[in-house]
Amino acid sequence: MTPAPVLCLASASPRRRDLLASIGVTVEVHPVDIDETPRSGEAADDYVVRLAREKALAGARLSVLPALGSDTAVVCDGEILGKPVDREHAGAMLRSLAGREHQVVTGVAVTGPAGLQTGCVTTRVFMRQITDAELAAYWATGEPSDKAGGYAIQGLAAVFVEHIEGSHSAVVGLPLYETADLLARQGVPVWNGALPIEPMS
Ligand SMILES: Cc1cn([C@H]2C[C@H](O)[C@@H](COP(=O)(O)OP(=O)(O)OP(=O)(O)O)O2)c(=O)[nH]c1=O
């Protein structure tokens, strides 16, 4: 039997639902539609935390449960890369990331009895060079289309990623270590209730 939901997930991302399920958090899914346009001159960490906060607050209006929102941006040379709109865009994005370092910035916000609390995690990702034939083959898999930066580290693009410094789960869409802390602060159980909730320090 699936445990009762303990959290409203204000997201259409199946990755975020699966990540939360992996630490024993069953969610009620409420995708929310917000304007994701970056403000002029907005830093990536401010941008993802702002969107995470807006998603959490919109989710809270749809549920009686504490609500979580999150946003992931790929940043290269200070520029925020969104999701690719077509094959050319996806190819240009991955070409710009190949053979060097970029950053993945993920913001998370949880609103509940303790009020609205946020966190932000930056992970350094180092990719190998990628050939044109590989780019074409990767686009044909369908994987890049709904992913920030046009790749999925948890999927086929793992063969392009030499190493990371930071949080793998944050690159996939939700930093689980920081999220567990935010959930504890709101009294939301993880491990389906088996992990003792520590009082806020
Ligand atoms: C870099 C990278 C991103 N992604 C995904 C995570 C996010 O789902 C997506 C970034 O877009 P987001 O706007 O953060 O999320 P979303 O549109 O999927 O869902 P919602 O706004 O409803 O919460 O890219 C991966 O799955 N793997 C990766 O390696």
Image: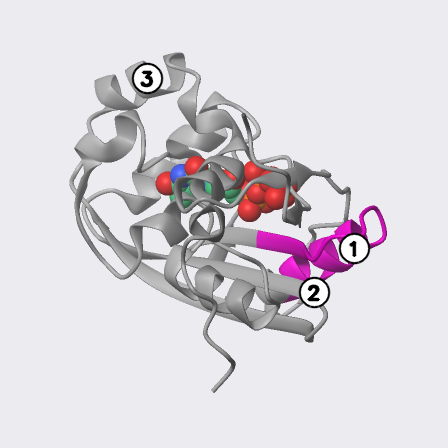
Q: Is residue 199 left or right of residue 143?
A: right
Residue 12 is situated, as x and y percent measured from the top left of the image, at 64, 35
Residue occupying the point 38% across, 62% down: 177
Tell me, yes or no, whether the two marked residues, 2 and 1, touch with CB atoms within 8 Å.
Answer: yes
State which quadrant residue 134 falls in. Answer: top left
Tell me how far mark 3 sits from mark 1, CA to CA: 41 Å
Around disc 1, counting alpha carbons within 10 Å, would you say few (fewer than 14), some (14 to 19), or many (20 or more)? Answer: many
- Between 101 and 178, the residue placed more toward the observer is 178
Residue position for label 1: 60
Q: Hey, which quadrant is residue 152 in on the image?
A: top left
Q: Position of residue 138 (x, y in %)?
A: 32, 20
The kind of residue tagged 1 is Ala
Q: Judge: label 2 CB < 8 Å from ligand 1.
A: no
- Calculate the distance from the C-alpha at mark 2 to the C-alpha at mark 3: 42 Å
Q: Nearer the viewer, residue 87 or 1?
A: 1
Q: State the extent of the magenta-drawn residues as a range.
A: 50-70
Q: How far across and how far down the image is residue 87, in percent?
A: 47, 22
State the image coordinates of residue 37 (x, y, percent, origin top left). 70, 53
Element marked by disc 2: strand
Label 3 near ligand 1 (CB < 8 Å): no
Residue of label 3: 136
